[in-house]
Image (spheres, rainbow, N blue to C red):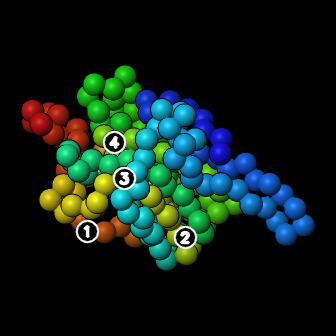
Amino acid sequence: MIVSSTSIDGARILDVEPAFDDRGFFARTWCRRELAEQGLSVEIAQESISFNRRKGTLRGLHFQTPPHDEVKIVRCVRGAILDVIVDLRPQSTTYLRSLSFELSAENHRAVYVPKGCAHGFQTLIDETEVHYQISSFYDPTAAAGHRFDDPAFAIVWPLPVSVISERDLQWPMFSAMETDGG
């Protein structure tokens, strides 16, 4: 694996190092030891997939609150997405910064999302599937989020939103929470 830093503290890009032969290639997509050598620790509690029928589908911005906060490793295994991380850690030097990456079945890239960051994505192709490795068990009482279109995060989504859940539309605006004293 090739682990690269990003402009958000603690977030990483995980690229594969394919070994090619006549059959195609083989590559490692996750290695606890290699991640630990980079200062990243992930014990996987669960894995999930998200299947999305339509291009323009938006999911996010999601996170879990402490003590159920979670690291996520996100990879697109079919289709393509614009994947977004927002740093919500007040003590971080990259607090409120957002960062986006294209993840696709073709580039085999993954993103390591640290605890304390919100995560979301928009599908760029119909019938897109996203795979998650998650460090904490899902706890509905800790599930939280912020609006995908909050001006505080300045996220530029590449497509009009074609599908979004009612729940994702109901998340609070972070900018409103800051104005109201939070």
Q: Give the label, 3 or 4, closer to the camera.
A: 3
Which residue, as the protein is rendered here, is positioned at the far top?
93
- Residue marked by disc 1: 166
Mark 4 and mark 2 in contact (Cβ < 8 Å)? no
Residue visible at 40% across and 51% down in the picture: 43
State the mark number for residue 115: 4
| Disc 2 element | strand
- Residue marked by disc 3: 135
Quick check: 95 above or below 60?
Answer: above
Look at label 4 and name its amino acid: Lys
Mark 2 and mark 1 in contact (Cβ < 8 Å)? no
Look at label 3 and name its amino acid: Ser
State the mark number for residue 128: 2
Drawn side of residue 20 relative to residue 121, left or right:
right
Residue visible at 35% across and 67% down in the picture: 164
Drawn side of residue 133 relative to residue 88, left or right:
right
Residue visible at 50% across and 65% down in the picture: 130
Residue 159 at x, y percent in the picture: 51, 58
Mark 4 and mark 3 in contact (Cβ < 8 Å)? yes
Look at label 1 and name its amino acid: Glu
Which of disc 4 and disc 1 is earlier in sequence? Answer: 4
**Label 1 to label 2: alpha-carbon separation:** 20 Å
**Label 3 to label 4: alpha-carbon separation:** 9 Å
**Label 1 to label 4: alpha-carbon separation:** 25 Å
| Disc 3 element | loop
Residue 116: quadrant of the picture: top left
